[in-house]
Amino acid sequence: MRSVLVGLLAGCLAGCATVSMAPGETTVETGISNKQTALRQASDAYCSDAEDKGWVAEQGGLAGLASILINGQREDRQPSVLYGEHIGADSGDTGELARRIADDAASANSGLQAVTSEAEAVKASGEAIRRADVTSFERALVRAQRARRGFSAAMETVRGRGGDVDAARIAINEFALEIDRARQLADDLLDLYADTGRPGA
């Protein structure tokens, strides 16, 4: 079963699925709706943005992500210390660092809200949910959780150096609430996929 799920995960990153059936080599291309395209694009953009801005670093690649999603964790257990190193949390000016963390957490929150809005549109569309859409959303959710842990770890480092981190704490807490909302929505989409997205459903 897991090998099948890994295959689905690897294949779902494409924009369409192609199925060949013998004899006759009949080929069927299944497109995706505009809303589903928007969800995948928003999710992929969020993941890229999180890495480009140094909120998270790619860890484990596709195989690591497959393990997380197949085991149903939706949250990896890898440490998120790289963000603190990226911004110099243990050596920079504490005031500037606290503001940086608050700004990054707010930006990550705003980006996740945009992805979540696309996911809500897919949920409300009444169309069949494809596993690729759920997986794309889950990838963004995993990145968001990594980012939150990185922000929290950096904030604690700055707090330990005497910095005022109240604004950063508020921004991180708000981000955590959005992550919880996204996690529930991911569960809803997965349930819908089970009901409507499977062949023959």
Image (spheres, grey):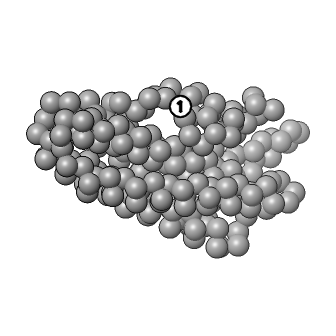
Residue 145 pos. (x, y %): 47, 44
Residue corresponding to mark 1 = 77
Q: Nearer the viewer, residue 91 or 57?
A: 91
Residue at 80% across, 46% down: 26
Q: Is residue 177 left or right of residue 72?
A: left
Q: Nearer the viewer, residue 38 or 173?
A: 173
Q: Quadrant of residue 51?
A: top left
Is residue 147 shown to the viewer in this render?
Answer: no
Q: Quadrant of residue 175?
A: bottom left
Q: Nearer the viewer, residue 34 or 169?
A: 169
- Residue 175, placed above or below residue 59: below
Residue 38 pos. (x, y %): 51, 62
Residue at 74% across, 61% down: 192
Is residue 8 shown to the viewer in this render?
Answer: yes
Q: Quadrant of residue 20?
A: top right
Q: Quadrant of the C terminus?
A: bottom right
Q: Quadrant of the N terminus?
A: top right
How packed is label 1: few (under 14 Cα within 10 Å), some, or many (20 or more)?
few
